[in-house]
Image (tube, grey):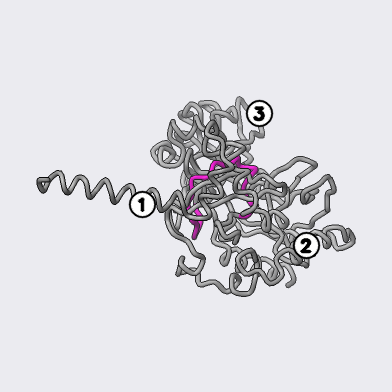
Amino acid sequence: MNQRRYMQWMGRSAGLCLLLAFCISPPVLGLQSRISSKDGKQGRSVRDAFAEVAAPAALRTVEVLVDGRRAAMGLCLDERGRVVTKASQLSDDDQVPKTVECRFDGPKRFEAKVLGVNLDHDLALLLLDPSQPEWVQQIANWSKLNQGSAPGEAFDEAQKAVALEDPSELGLREGQWLVTASPGSTPLSVGTLSRLPQQVGRREGFLGITMTDASGGVGIADVIEGTGADNAGVQVGDVVVAINKDAMLSRRSLVEKVSDMRPGSRLELEIRRDGKRLILEAILGMRPWEDGIYADEEDRNSGRLSRVRSGFPRVIQHDGILDPRDCGGPLVNLEGRIVALNIARAGRTRSYAIPIGLVHQVAQEIERRAVR
């Protein structure tokens, strides 16, 4: 055998050994037997195969309902009934919603109070109504299930104090399986870790207009098709008098106002048109040259993306497919340990999640502000 053929043989043998090692490892071997060859990565049989892994976290996972409709998922942190979820899913305009309820696995709904939000992380902290004791039993079931079982304990003191700068403390490594739990028996999504904790830069809001000077406001010289301004009904020749009731006396004031807001934010435009005052509502987008990074053509054709999907100080990235309403719930590893909280669907194969240690820190900060 010449040297070239020998090297080829060695390379193929090494690859075969790695493949065999993966396939016969206990966690994967047990899962393979339950997966249908007809299902894709997000197929029902694939997700069902990970049900046992997600079961401990499922007992603490809730659907968050706003005005009776599911808006997001949430995670019950402790026996006090504190629940964390994705803040922007509760309201389109960053205002506290009137009616919020949480539902574990079952029809019963529990009223919840919004203690506060953290816009940097897009996290909201809820508190379940203590006068509805049924949810306490749900938490007791979780505690009983995990008593004395370290691998399945989703929340313990060690995780609360996890070193955020050291991903190994969470057992995070690129390529590992991650499962999005649901309140029921079937996980919402299965994926793999793409990137370790990172910062996702904040993007400034984009209205989609060209401005000109005008008396008593900012004139509209052009409206870009398909932007927030266009969808709101802004027309060439309009004069923007105020945004969110703040007077717009110059082009500079309008640019600063819009740039200070995230893509996805709603704003109220007071317009002067043909001597009449109009109130229009616009939703800010991303600048076209930035939008290609976060929502390219392939992303746009792959389903709905989260309204707030950038600007996070620290997140991991995985390729689990989520609906925006699936965000806010826990992400677990193959040991059943909660490692992060899903916070955004940002692209076709790009979802973000906040490391669980950071979630605890933000929740504590929100609670401290609420009791002042």
Q: Amino acid at mark 3?
A: Lys
Q: Position of residue 225 (x, y in %)?
A: 48, 26
Vertical comparison of 36 with 90: above or below: above
Label 1 environment density (alpha carbons within 10 Å; few <14, some 14–19, many ≥20): few
Please name the residue that numbered disc 1 is placed on. 18
For the residue labelled by badge 3, is the local secondary structure a helix, a strand or a loop?
strand
Measured in 3D between alpha carbons, the distance from the residue under mark 1 to the one under mark 2, in whole angstroms, is 41 Å
Q: Nearer the viewer, residue 105 or 100?
A: 105
Please name the residue that numbered disc 3 is placed on. 276
Q: Position of residue 201 (x, y in %)?
A: 44, 53
Where, quadrant-wise, is the N terminus in this rendering? Answer: top left
Residue 318 numbered mark, or none: none
- Residue for point 52% across, 55% down: 26
Vertical comparison of 148 with 86: above or below: below
- Residue for point 55% across, 33% down: 39
Q: Is residue 69 left or right of residue 316?
A: right
Q: What is the magenta range?
A: 311-330
Q: Nearer the viewer, residue 104 or 303?
A: 104
Say which of marks 1 and 2 sits in front.
1
Q: Position of residue 182 (x, y in %)?
A: 67, 48
Count the numbered circles shown: 3
Q: Amino acid at mark 2?
A: Ile
**Residue 114 visible here:** yes
Q: Amino acid at mark 1?
A: Leu
Task: Check the image and name the residue furthest to the left.
Answer: 2
Instruction: Reply yes or no: does residue 19 show up in magenta.
Output: no
Please name the residue that numbered disc 2 is placed on. 139
For the residue labelled by badge 1, is the local secondary structure a helix, a strand or a loop?
helix
Where, quadrant-wise, is the C terminus in this rendering? Answer: bottom right
Nearer the N terminus, badge 1 or badge 3? 1
Measured in 3D between alpha carbons, the distance from the residue under mark 1 to the one under mark 3, in whole angstroms, is 72 Å
Measured in 3D between alpha carbons, the distance from the residue under mark 2 to the one under mark 3, in whole angstroms, is 57 Å
